[in-house]
Image (cartoon, rainbow, N blue to C red):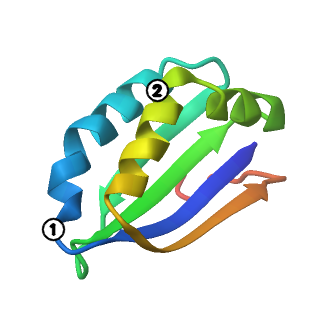
Amino acid sequence: MIIVSGTAKVEPGALDKVRAVMEATILETRKEEGCIYYSYGVDVIDSDTIVVLEYWENWAALEKHFAQPHMAVWIKTLGEAGVVSRDIRFIEAGEERNIFG
């Protein structure tokens, strides 16, 4: 499994302007083959920071995801929101355990 996790901070107040495109991107991405989970959230302490969490079956599915038309729209829109900083990690996960039963 591939885990994508991190944050992107945008200009103050810009998140409200891009929310509709962000929601559309989530809905379209969740339909993609190989997508296990895909979500954006807002940091509770810093409302201008987007929190990213994605699970993909493999690298090929993730690479195909970046070529989708809705991703081109999202990347353009995010750029217009004025990304101040970004820290996104792409991690290949190994063994998975359920410690809660």
Residue nearer the viewer, 77 or 6: 77
Examine the image and state in which quarter residue 39 appears.
top left
On the image, the x and y values in percent for residue 45 come to 23, 82
Examine the image and state in which quarter residue 88 appears.
bottom right
In this picture, residue 39 sits left or right of residue 68: left
Packing grade of label 1 (10 A; few <14, some 14-19, many >=20) is few
In this picture, residue 11 sits left or right of residue 87: left
Quarter the N terminus occupies? top right
Residue type, mark 2 in image? His
In this picture, residue 21 sits left or right of residue 35: left
Name above or below for residue 7 compared with residue 56: below
Residue type, mark 1 in image? Gly
On the image, the x and y values in percent for residue 3 come to 67, 52
Name above or below for residue 75 compared with residue 81: above
Residue nearer the viewer, 79 or 36: 79
- Where disc 2 sits, the SS reads helix
On the image, the x and y values in percent for residue 78 come to 39, 52
Residue matched to label 2: 70
x 15%, y 68%: residue = 13
On the image, the x and y values in percent for residue 67 come to 66, 28
Does any portion of residue 57 appear in the rendered image?
Answer: no
Does any portion of residue 48 appear in the rendered image?
Answer: yes
Residue matched to label 1: 13
